[in-house]
Image: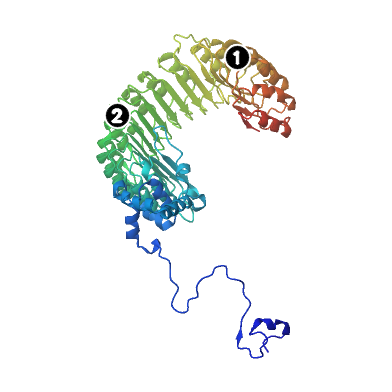
Amino acid sequence: MFLPNPKDSSLFLPHGSSHVDVYFMPRKRSRISAPFVVSGEPKQQPSIEVLPDECLFEVFRRLPGGQERSACASVSKRWLMLLSSIRRDEICNSKIVQSVEPEIQSNPQKANDFSETKQKCEFDDSNGIKSEDEEFQETDAQGCLSRCLEGKNATDVRLAAIAVGTASRGGLGKLSIRGSNSTRGLTNLGLKAVSRGCPDLQVLSLWNLSSIGDEGLCEIASGCHLLQKIDLCHCPGITDEGLIAIAKNCPNLMSVTVESCSNIGNESLQALGRNCPNLKYITVKNCPLVSDQGIASLFSSAGHILTNAKLQALNISDVSLAVIGHYGSALTDLTLIGLENVNERGFWVMGKGQGLQKLRSLSITACKGVSDLGIEAVGKGCPDLKMIALRKCLLVSDRGLVSFAKAAESLESLQLEECHRITQYGIFGILANCCKKLKALALANCLGIQDLDFGGLPLTSLCLSLRSLTIRNCPGFGDAGLGLLGRLCPKLTQVDLSGLQGITDAGVLPLVQCSEAGLVKVNLSECVNLTDNVVTAIAKLHGETLEFLNLDGCKYVTDVSLMAIARNCTVITELDVSRCGITDSGIAALAAAEQISLQILSLGGCFLVSDESLPFLVVLGKNLVGLNIQHCRGISFATVDLLLDQLWRCDILS
């Protein structure tokens, strides 16, 4: 009745009986033999997990050392978070824990169980946690533990693991967090763990963290009183409340950077000025709530201690610059970028304030109010100014530049970029009549500079102090200007003429021949009209001093130049002949020179170089640390593989 197949009658008990009362389904043999429980619920083994958090907290703070705490932290997220909430002063000393050691020693089974548990409880990358030795192998020059978390690695669990793992070593000294996990993003809970486990934190950088707010920063302020540097970039959740807490609780604070934080305003700057007696570096960029009130309060309170200040894209006016010029008595470096509401009067008053007596470096970029009158006042009001950089200052002309140079008698470096009202009259006026200490002159993208006919202009004085000359991408600068520069500046050691496509051998040769000190670094990249004559002259006249030569894009440079370099340049370490007309013969000439010890060689885009250069490159590779053979169509993949095998110490770009 139950079985259609009579062969299955063996499943019924008892065998051979026609009266059947019980039916048993087939089953596998049980792997574990356990007593049969007739009645009542099964007994559960006692577990520490049944303890509430308060009891576990008391257990964890009595663990004997850092290794034990790290092992317990890897058991579960609950244990990790409990351990990360324990402050250093809440951890019991070793005397309390030593009372349990006799019990472990008297019972070998407990000791073995503890050892096995300790071995199993290790940090694992799959859970987002690393071993203590692997996680904190990065240290700075001062020996402080440092950690940088980016993207998906920035989570509360990882920060908690870092806090627990370094607690026995004193905690982290430097922490940088850039972005956060999209699914398990960093929150204030992670910073809370850091504040409790890393009380000696000195440097904190938070970038692109929208989930962090004042609560997390207040936790850092309450637990990390030794904080010296804090960087906040693109943190919209942080307001004045969080930064004020840092200012009030961290008296050692020396450096503050606030960038693109839309909810930080004047109150934070006021608190920094009043409560931070060691503040030396301040950067405020693109914070719409910061106005004259905040900048004026900061400098009036801390101007006597601030040494470096950078203000960029702020809604401040002439008032702020006036306060800086009056109270910035300790400033040595000042950077002003994109201050659209500052007028000519602001720079004039800043210079007339007579408070910037120690200013050594000034950088002004894209400030429409910079004019001849303002820059002249700055030169007179900053007697110790040694470096000035003017970028995109469209109102500064030759008159203001020369007046400034005459007033700034200590000037050593002048940089001009996209200042289109500057001409050769202003440049040669500075070199010939003022700036007796000028060592470096750099011009870049100045479209107003054009070759002028100075005729037989007598040179009443030479600029013997100038050592470095840079003229980049100034299309109007030609051979005549270079020839006059060579006569005015005979002590040049570094020359950068990259991007001057209008110059020829006739302009560069006089500059090279007039250099008496010996050229050390020469950059002629993208000077497409230069030939072997210039390179040969440089090699013959300055071969004993030349260390760096860049000829990238000089298509008329051939093997003749490489042969001259091989014969004369004994100390050259870096050579770039990318996109030049060299062949295998030129490489062979370099390899045959016994006195050359090149470290970096660039052959990118040299389509005439082929596989035949392999033995020569191997010879050169004995000293090379960098070799660029990108876009060399004549070099096959097999040759590249051989180079990679034989020059294993050299970084090869292919």
Amino acid type at circle 1 is: Cys
Check residue 330 in the rendering and tell me which mark sits there, or answer none: 2
State whether residue 426 appears in this view. Answer: no
Residue at 49% x, 56% y is: 183
Q: Position of residue 494 (x, y in %)?
A: 51, 18
The residue beneath circle 1 is 569
Q: Residues within 10 Å of mark 1 (few under 14, many from 20)?
A: many
Image quarter hosting the N terminus: bottom right
In this view of the protein, which residue sits in the foreground, 639 or 380? 639
Tell me if residue 357 comes above or below residue 240 in the rendering.
Answer: above
Label 2 residue SS: loop
Disc 1 to disc 2, C-alpha distance: 47 Å
Q: Residue at x 35, y 60 (%)?
A: 53
Image depth: mark 1 or mark 2 in front:
1
- The x, y position of residue 347, in whole percent, is 34, 31
Classed neighbour count for the residue bearing mark 2: other residues with Cα under 10 Å, few (<14), some (14–19), many (≥20) = some
> Judging from the image, what secondary structure is the residue with disc 1 in?
loop
Q: Which quadrant of the view contains residue 632?
A: top right
The x and y percentages for residue 510 are 57, 12
